[in-house]
Image (spheres, rainbow, N blue to C red):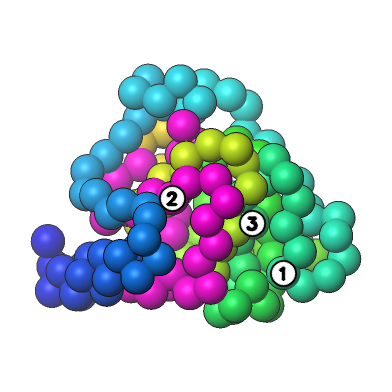
Amino acid sequence: MNRTMSRKIPAAVALLAAMGMGMVTAGSATAAENPAGAAPVSVEASKSGESGAAQTGRLHLYGGNNFSGYTVSFTATNHWLGDNYWDGTSISVDNGANSAKNRTGRWVQMYTIGSRDGNCRGDNVGFANGVDFTNLGGFNNTISCLIFS
């Protein structure tokens, strides 16, 4: 693990510990290991029209801290955020999220390395339904893959 990543893990652990939930792990996952990975990817724009509002059934990512900036929401596993764009832009979501709200009804694991072949790996952080991250800490601007469980 490189020096930058080794600093990010303790920061994420501290963030999650302060929240009293979530977990940080290192490793990889594939669509075969996660039944949700077999579902078709569905990315839909937030229809709320207000910054920070979160709809049920979606993972909401925000480009800024405290649910500000660009927005996008996901309803299923997405192995490569490089093919997705912030709502109303041509700017890739890959490595751009700084805050998140989980309203999926499921556990979501976010990885730093995604790929079109269905492999997610690298440092990762997972969090339960109903958890909000006003700041992703050491994972700011590093998320490339989402796995819904």
Q: Earlier in the sequence, mark 2 or mark 1?
A: 1
Q: Secondary structure at mark 2?
A: strand
Residue drawn at (48%, 27%) of the image: 37
Report, in whole angstroms, how far the alpha carbon at label 3 lies from the one at label 1.
9 Å
Which of the pair 102/119 is nearer the observer?
102
Q: Is residue 58 above or below residue 70?
A: above
| Residue 25 among those drawn in magenta | no
Q: Is residue 28 visible?
A: yes
Residue identifier under label 2: 127
> Front-most of 83 and 41?
41
Seen in the picture, residue 133 relative to 41 is either above or below; the reply is: below
- Mark 3 lies on a secondary structure that is strand
In this rendering, position of residue 38 left or right of residue 71: left
Query: Image check: 76 left or right of 4?
Result: right
Q: Position of residue 42 (x, y in %)?
A: 68, 37
Residue 91 horizontal/vertical position (percent): 65, 68
Residue 60: mark = 3
Which residue has dot 1 on it?
A: 52
Q: Which amino acid, mark 3?
A: His
Q: Which residues are magenta?
A: 120-149
**Of the image marks 3 and 1, the number of the one nearer the N terminus:** 1
Residue 52 occupies which quadrant of the picture? bottom right
